[in-house]
Image (cartoon, coloured by chain):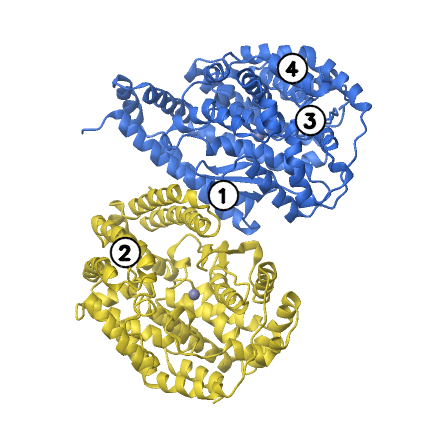
Chain colours: A blue, B yellow
């Protein structure tokens, strides 16, 4: 046998990569194309494939191959790839199959029931199912913590943000918590004096679609390596060689779809920008959920809601939707940056969004660590919502602790990634401005390549070569620093 | 172990069925959606999956399981399913893996080169690649013949039309060959006296698409279990629970797309009509390529070009494309039934099409049996084209023996299915008319359910329960009888 254990591991990763390609396209198709009666067969086919992939990822021979590869002479890139192969092997092997199946079943039951329970504001009906999912998530955390040596919550967080720890989250969220409520109030007072014109629809779907595609072109999206389609819940799927973005349209309002499309274009550009020569190996993959969100928020917030970018967007809007007073650039920018505390996370603006995330982090962490129970959630939610955003959610489970399906579907440890992403994005643009003092003028001149080149070099082509903290340090010259996010919000929303 | 060998075989078939589901959707997506840069990764992913499916289909344990299942007590349906499991096992195991790979490589090279060679009319450049593909197809036939005990050509034909033999093809094509050239001449003379108005375009794609979907609804297509999209080469793909049909549009002409869509709706209805309680097992699959074509031609020719059906179609055409003199029903029917000998098979009408198929059958059979060689093809082609259709193709390889890619891509033994399908379709409608003497009045009243119910009961829900000849006998009360096709053409085209 002339090839090394490392080569054999790479060969197996390539096989998994190819099979996951089919899963990814089938999943995209399920959301974007599939008629209703196809769902059962599709779910069965994808579950069969999932089982097969799991079987390949837990092949008993892997343990020995990994041990042998550790003894082989590897260069730095190979070493990083081996680290990532080990990470995914640990993730696939840490959990007993019975637990994976029990959690998947409990989560899918809880999620299915949630759809109607939420509409009926039925917390009492929801709580039993949620309790079972949380029980199994705790068990999952215990297994992952044992395998990794991390704390319970960190073991879950590490799945989405490798290398990130709750001590670090505490540090940056603690900072945010100090100044965010005051900032929200100050922005509210300032914006109350700025009247804003509402765009007058209808805005036909076909025109919105053409506008979204033009915005994607402006942002450098490669349509020979991806598409834009529709789905009920927008997402960015597919594979790096063929990115499948989705959006949804409302005929009475075009900004949600346009800004959503710009957001997903950030995710899509990250995928399209991953290195081709590593493709098929774990090291080629996007680093983490927080890093991914830092790309979508770089596109949507840092660049997309930049006053100079709005000047670039305006002619496209007029081209596809005709002109009207509300499309005047300053008014468009006011529409894009309107701040309004509200109970619903997914509708939140850039300034209030972190409050929703902090609230969830402060509940899900003690929940996993056993300091609180599922029955404690509503009272905690109400108190924190009043404290952070001044909103009363008592008795309003529907728009309170039942608004998201993350916990019910077993996704715990994920929420911090949204706000970590917003902070990373602010940090990238702060670093860009240090290195390119004329960045804002370049954006105003439509020279967006400067932004994309920076992101490509520092983030996209780095894939999973470094753990998240090291990537952040290498890209921006410092560790995660919430001061950049604060400065960004103050500058954009208070002109300070 | 409490379950039987037969149960275990069924379990494995279900797994293959589910994995093939993903292959099918990925293949459809490749034709209907995929941007160009996604092709390499998609091809690799599908090849990986193909290898995995082949590995499962040739698992050495299967031989023993099949032998044990043969000894078990099975009911009639289980017995038929076991026969089909054996058939697919033989097909997967008859060929050495090296031969499969060599043929796939030679075919894909030959096919790729053919695209430009055809444009350049370059037979001399094409012949070497084709010779290699034919050499490997002969070897394939030898292996399949050894495994099945059939003759060389029959072993290939049996892959597409199980139970059909060349003696039977000789019998029905021999009959056809007698009267077809005379019929073509007579129809030509008759139609020369019937002036036809040409529809005046342009016909926007979106209107044609809406028209096609309305025609599909008229034909009972279930849009909750399928879709219509676009691709360069129309086909019917997907899975029975989620049929993916494609068409293509020409802005200057709407009938090719409309009739093509009606054709594919026949294929799609067969798939949608397969029994759900057998799904996942080979017995649930469509019987054969000829049977499949009998459904598309039942829809396109028997029903779709029926003068009473044209009356149902006309209001849909007017609804989507507006009215014009050429849309008068009798004129539409003349447009749909225009007969014109031409060199190109895929453009051929219902009457001249069989001549193209007979010609190919009379060349590919001796080619596989070694009585002729690849270099003999052009002269034979020219002679038969003159004899059957009175057309001179000498030196015109492009529109002669290089027009189709079937042989170059290694598909030999398939061509007869097109005309077998046309004959079966005529036989179905002859049987329907015997059982329902008012069939034509029902069609005129728009009561198409009578047709669909007959096809559903006799063909769709039978799946692969019977070998083709038995299915034909059971469905229509007699074996394949070319007299029905002749009577259909005489009645429709000569009013006799
Ligand atoms: Zn996002
Ligand atoms: Zn067909």
Residue B258 vertical position relative to residue B171 in the rendered view, above or below: above
The chain ID associated with circle 1 is: A
Q: Which residue is mark 1?
A: A43
First along the sequence among labels 1 and 4: 1
Mark in front: 1 vs 4: 4
- In three-dimensional space, the C-alpha distance between marks 4 and 2, rounded to whole angstroms, equals 63 Å
* Contact, mark 1 vs mark 3 (Cβ under 8 Å): no
Q: Which residue is mark 4?
A: A486
Q: Secondary structure at mark 3?
A: loop
The x and y percentages for residue A66 are: 30, 22
- In three-dimensional space, the C-alpha distance between marks 1 and 2, rounded to whole angstroms, equals 38 Å
* Contact, mark 3 vs mark 2 (Cβ under 8 Å): no
Q: Which quarter holds ligand 2?
A: bottom left
Describe residue B197's horizontal placement relative to residue A208 as left or right: left
**Nearest to the observer: residue B3 or residue B241:** B241
Describe residue A398's horizontal placement relative to residue B219 as left or right: right
Q: Is residue B72 visible?
A: no
Q: Which residue is mark 3?
A: A349
- In three-dimensional space, the C-alpha distance between marks 3 and 2, rounded to whole angstroms, equals 57 Å
Q: Residue at horizontal 61%, vertical 12%?
A: A483
The x and y percentages for residue A210 are: 61, 45
Mark in front: 4 vs 3: 4
Report whether the residue tagged 1 is closer than 8 Å to ligand 1.
no
Q: Which residue is mark 2?
A: B110
Q: Secondary structure at mark 4?
A: helix
The chain ID associated with circle 3 is: A
């Amino acid at each position: 046998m002339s090839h090394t254990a490392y080569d054999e591991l790479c060969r197996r990763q390539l096989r998994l990569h190819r099979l996951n390609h089919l899963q990814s396209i089938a999943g995209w198709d399920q959301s974007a194309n599939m008629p209703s009666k196809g769902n059962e067969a599709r779910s069965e086919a994808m579950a069969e494939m999932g089982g097969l992939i799991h079987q390949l990822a837990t092949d008993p021979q892997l343990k020995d191959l990994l041990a042998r590869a550790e003894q082989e002479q590897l260069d730095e890139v190979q070493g990083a790839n081996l680290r990532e192969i080990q990470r995914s092997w640990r993730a696939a092997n840490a959990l007993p199959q019975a637990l994976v199946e029990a959690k998947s079943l409990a989560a899918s039951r809880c999620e299915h029931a949630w759809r109607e329970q939420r509409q009926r504001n039925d917390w009492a009906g929801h709580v039993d199912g949620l309790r079972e999912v949380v029980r199994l998530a705790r068990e999952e955390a215990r297994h992952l913590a044992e395998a990794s040596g991390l704390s319970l919550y960190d073991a879950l967080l590490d799945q989405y943000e490798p290398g990130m720890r709750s001590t670090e989250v505490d540090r940056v969220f603690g900072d945010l918590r100090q100044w965010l409520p005051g900032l929200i109030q100050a922005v509210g007072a300032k914006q109350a004096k700025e009247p804003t014109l509402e765009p007058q629809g209808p805005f036909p779907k076909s025109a919105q679609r053409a506008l979204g595609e033009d915005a994607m072109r402006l942002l450098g999206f490669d349509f020979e390596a991806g598409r834009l389609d529709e789905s009920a819940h927008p997402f960015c799927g597919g594979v790096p060689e063929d990115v499948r973005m989705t959006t949804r349209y409302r005929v009475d309002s075009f900004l949600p779809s346009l800004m959503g499309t710009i957001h997903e274009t950030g995710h899509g550009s990250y995928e399209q920008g991953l290195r081709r020569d590593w493709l098929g190996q774990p090291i080629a993959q996007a680093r983490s959920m927080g890093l991914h969100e830092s790309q979508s928020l770089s596109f949507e917030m840092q660049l997309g809601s930049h006053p100079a970018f709005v000047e670039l967007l305006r002619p496209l809007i007029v081209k596809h939707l005709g002109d009207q007073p509300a499309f005047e650039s300053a008014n468009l920018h006011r529409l894009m940056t309107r701040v309004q505390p509200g109970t619903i996370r997914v509708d939140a603006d850039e300034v209030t969004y972190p409050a929703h995330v902090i609230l969830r982090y402060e509940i899900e962490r003690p929940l996993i660590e056993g300091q609180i129970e599922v029955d404690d959630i509503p009272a905690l939610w109400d108190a924190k919502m009043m404290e952070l955003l001044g909103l009363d959610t008592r008795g309003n489970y529907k728009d309170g602790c039942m608004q998201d399906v993350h916990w019910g579907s077993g996704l715990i440890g994920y929420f911090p990634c949204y706000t970590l992403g917003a902070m990373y994005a602010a940090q990238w643009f702060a670093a860009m401005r240090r290195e390119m003092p004329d960045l804002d003028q370049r954006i105003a001149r439509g020279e967006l390549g400067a932004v994309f080149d920076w992101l490509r070099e520092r983030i996209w082509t780095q894939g999973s070569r470094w753990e998240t903290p090291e990537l952040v340090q290498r890209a921006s010259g410092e560790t995660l620093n919430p001061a950049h996010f604060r400065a960004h919000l103050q500058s954009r929303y208070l002109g300070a």
